[in-house]
Amino acid sequence: MAEVTLKDVALASGCSIATVSRVLAGTRPVGAETARTVRAAAERLGYRPNHVARALRSRSTGTVGLVLPQITNPFFPTLVRELEHALHAEGRAVLLADCDDDPATEAARIGALLARQVDALLLIPVDERHSREAVAAAAAQVPLVLLDRGCGPGVADSVAVDNAAGMALVLAHLAATGRRRPCFIGAAGTASAAVERRTAYESGAAALDPAAPGRLALGDFSVEWGRAAVDRLWPARPDAVVCANDLIAAGALQRLRQLGADVPGEVAVTGFDDIPLAGLADPALTTVRQPVADLAAEAARLLSRRRTDGSSGPCHTVRLAPELVVRASSGTAVAVAADGPFRTS
Amino acid sequence: MAEVTLKDVALASGCSIATVSRVLAGTRPVGAETARTVRAAAERLGYRPNHVARALRSRSTGTVGLVLPQITNPFFPTLVRELEHALHAEGRAVLLADCDDDPATEAARIGALLARQVDALLLIPVDERHSREAVAAAAAQVPLVLLDRGCGPGVADSVAVDNAAGMALVLAHLAATGRRRPCFIGAAGTASAAVERRTAYESGAAALDPAAPGRLALGDFSVEWGRAAVDRLWPARPDAVVCANDLIAAGALQRLRQLGADVPGEVAVTGFDDIPLAGLADPALTTVRQPVADLAAEAARLLSRRRTDGSSGPCHTVRLAPELVVRASSGTAVAVAADGPFRTS
DNA sequence: AAATTCTCGGAGAACGTTTTCCGGCGGTAG
DNA sequence: CTACCGCCGGAAAACGTTCTCCGAGAATTT
């Protein structure tokens, strides 16, 4: 049926297998007349090259492994989509691996992908520390680009958003709209996004209020934690709740509303990532948009560079600038009687 | 480095390539002593089988293509996750293809996957009609299972939730909680989920109110449409807004709140799918949960059955029972003065 | 005109498996 | 003792490419 091979085309066109391969792959110049004959025969028989055989011989599968902690994390789908498009545009296929947020399965998945001879790996590490070993081992075998989160210095190429810049945008916006008592709900742990966003808050918030860097609560990147953290921080009556990601912000928003707080009049809430949920929250969430398409394009670029330059060079780390998306949750503040004379324009 | 082949193991263990292959693959019984020697040598050298060569010879790549309309559709990530796990558990890898909701790219992606000799395809069709041709062609070449949405009768095996049953659960719940004037916001078009949910509403709602089947608005499966549809239906003062999916419901909820409607007191809102957003909406959304893990398991089962039974048998269609998740958005109704004497227990 | 290069095509060796076929060896039956 | 069968192991043929040689003829140089 669909079993047309080079041999068949060769037979039908009256020349050798080698010639057919050369014509179809364009590997080496071939007489114009012969080329036409071959192409005609191939077309007529409906020849489809066998990628497996090609991969075996040329030691390249044209396949990239994409490993991520949890596809259900709402930030990832758009990233996956962009990556898939970028890679498909280069004629590469994407082998997907979901790690269940567990470093052990992550290591297993990486191993499985390497066994399938992927040409390269795109990887969002589960954990800065616990992923390190497996990632380093993999990076020694194929080009590997880390996405969104780092994994220790010098392990592999990496591309991520500039978290510090994003947090700075948020704080500048809050300052410009008259907020003076920010607090921060972040994530504990050593994950690079957690650390960078946290420290950026600490160093940036001091400009608004010397006490601000101290007003923070650290948990994880979940809605539940956002809710819980509000209970801890709200008694101090901040006029802005800066959250380390949108999920936390969604939880915070929910809890604040339950507590009867007026958002954004009494207190502003901001997120990070601009997941689809952000625009749907009520009030819609002011947040920092990651340049997802650029991240994907840059990752693809790093991969092909690694392929040509050889895998030995120094590690490149790319940081892309985020964009502030102002929505209702940080809108006009009302004058607050109790804690200070602040109001907005 | 990682270039240990069967030949090396054969050399190191002093027997032939064939024997090594047999021991490691367990294809044929082999002397106990020899087997031990071979296994030891393989272990010592760190032999990793080459999947590409294996695929070439055995005409099976151990790879399944997963084609979906848009990974960013919030219902898909959890499904993808379950499918990935189910397939990985069988030792198969998942080749992901995102179609951008476009039948043309869908056809292209299917072609690319077939060219890469996937063993089978898991496919969520973009469109009932426009996907038909490409799907049928693909189904002729490899085992293919349709997921979530159908694609015309007799085209391929398919597994989906029982949409009619889900809608019936919703209507029964609304009836039980005293709602008597439901309306429906659905999606136009021929997609099976759209049609089934719509007709299930039409036939089920008549029991509550003879006029109910007529109160419906059809658009697409988006938040925007949910918002817009409320503007059309709200003037009729329904006491329940039944939505064809959670995105529509989220939009409806948002708009109803803007209009000052009391949910759930004055009007209940229900969704379908139970995407993560549903639990986060305010009020939390009553919806129909799809048995995602079961869908994935069933799809995997159908695939392996196709593989063994040969690809010629009749098409199996599996429908799984959904589950009603009652949350705040359909909670206790208040007595409504205007339109009737209805109240709840 | 002879020598050299250039161009185009073919034969065949890889790539790393799986699998078919075959041969030797021990045991059992005739 | 011979014949046959079952078991285990090896040699080698696939699988469908790509790519390296090689050679024959044409084109170019000396």
Image: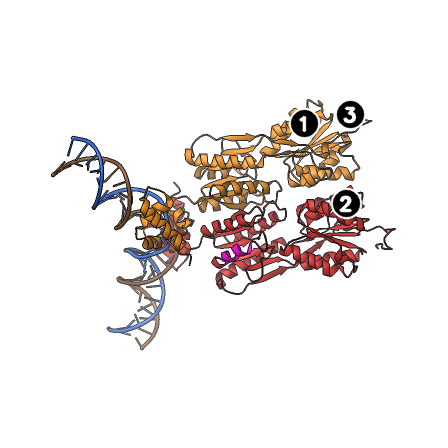
Chain colours: A red, B orange, C blue, D brown
The disc at residue B343 is 3
Dot 3 crowding, Cα within 10 Å, few <14, some 14–19, many 20+: some
Within the magenta stretch, is there residue B236?
A: no
Q: Position of residue B177 (x, y in %)?
A: 72, 26
Confirm or deny contact between disc 1 and disc 2 (CB under 8 A): no
In the drawing, does residue A89 fall left or right of residue A177? Answer: left
Secondary structure beneath dot 3 equals: loop
- Label 1 chain ID: B
Query: Gap between marks 2 and 3, in whole Å?
Result: 31 Å
Quarter residue B73 falls in: top right
Q: Identify the residue position indicated by label 1 in the image.
A: B171
Residue stretch rendered in magenta on the structure: A129-139
Which residue is located at x 44 percent, y 39 percent? B142
Confirm or deny contact between disc 1 and disc 3 (CB under 8 A): no
Which residue is located at x 75 percent, y 47 percent? A230
Question: Amino acid under label 2?
Answer: Leu
* Nearest the eye: B146 or B323: B323
The answer to whether marks 1 and 3 sit on the same chain is yes
Could one spot residue B318 in this view of the protein?
A: yes
What is the quadrant of the C terminus of chain A in the image?
Answer: bottom right
Within the magenta stretch, is there residue A133?
A: yes
Question: Amino acid under label 1?
Answer: Leu
Q: Identify the residue position indicated by label 2 in the image.
A: A256
Q: Position of residue B46 (x, y in %)?
A: 41, 54
The answer to whether marks 1 and 2 sit on the same chain is no
* Nearest the eye: D8 or B157: D8
Of circles 1 and 2, the one toward us is 2
In the drawing, does residue A279 fall left or right of residue B62? Answer: right
Secondary structure beneath dot 1 equals: helix
Could one spot residue A84 in this view of the protein?
A: no
